[in-house]
Amino acid sequence: MKDKRPKYEPKEYWESKLGRNFNIRGAALGSLSTSFNMWSLKAGLRSLTERCSQRLYLSISDREHTRSFEVLDIGCGTGNYIRYWKDLGIEHLTGIDITSVSINSLRSLYPNGYFHCMDISDERAPEILGRKFDIISAMNILLHITDDEKFERALSNISQILKEGGLLLVADPIITKNYWGEPFTEDSSSKCRSLRQYLSVFGRNDLSIMDLWPTTFLMSNPIDTGSKAAFQLLSMFWRFTVIMARKEKSGAILGRLLYNVELVLPRILKNGPTGKFLVALKETKSCAKDG
């Protein structure tokens, strides 16, 4: 009989994980090589930038326009999206994380930023932050709020600190078809939720979804397919990927190959079996009343 794993405690879990590896492996797929993780991140960031530019959610190419935005990155971790926003010319940047290792490190790396050790699901979060933001990013963060009450409170807090007409950017394993994986238990450090669940919570918090698309197609584990057979086939491919991507050299080769495949797949497929990017708008009071 296997020993039961301890109940998931977010702060302790992530403090330990990032304390051991304050790098992309600590924040992402820890069992895979740094090189593969970097290619996967690069694929996701390219998809995010292209989609937001094409749909005009963000004037990413207009540095003069974006420079004045107030941006909050929730769960800033090792700083992947802090660097992303910095590279886009954002000058007013705030990051929050539940771990002291993240906040202390990022304060040293980005002395002009504002970094706070706090939990977005804490009911005091809006008061602690004390201001509102034009853009809030929560990239691969909400899935780690496994308690449904805290998940809803986190989104309520986000709505309160997002300006009317502001944008919320989320990356999460959002289920649009069917989930065929293992059931989630109290020791699970993440939790997939359906698009219906997001819509329900968003509707109660004056948030409306503007867009939803795959983060990547093949560079993460499959979670969302129309049939069990498709899930099993993609899971076999992912197991092969994990074996190949554990070592740096083979991980770099496979990562580059899949990155180039990811350039083509969005032109063919509208939905994907892995995580999703989501863009939501904070409704104005008049729109909220009309709705």
Image (cartoon, rainbow, N blue to C red):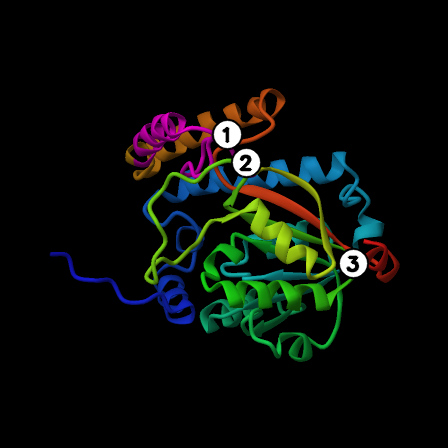
Residue 191 at x, y percent in the picture? 44, 53
* Span shown in magenta: 215-242
Residue at (56, 75) in percent of width and height: 122
| Residue type pointed to by label 3 | Phe
Q: Which mark is residue 43?
A: 2
Q: Is residue 233 visible?
A: yes
Which residue, as the protein is rendered here, is positioned at the far left? 1
In the shown orientation, is residue 244 left or right of residue 100?
left
Query: Type of residue at label 1?
Result: Tyr
Secondary element type, mark 1 = helix
The mark nearer the N terminus, 2 or 1, is: 2
Of residue 52 and residue 230, the one placed in the foreground of this image is 230
Residue at x 30% of width, y 38% of height = 247
Q: Is residue 207 magenta?
A: no
Image mark for residue 69: 3
Quarter that holds the N terminus: bottom left
Name the residue carrying label 1.
259
Marks 3 and 1 sit apart, C-alpha to C-alpha, by 30 Å
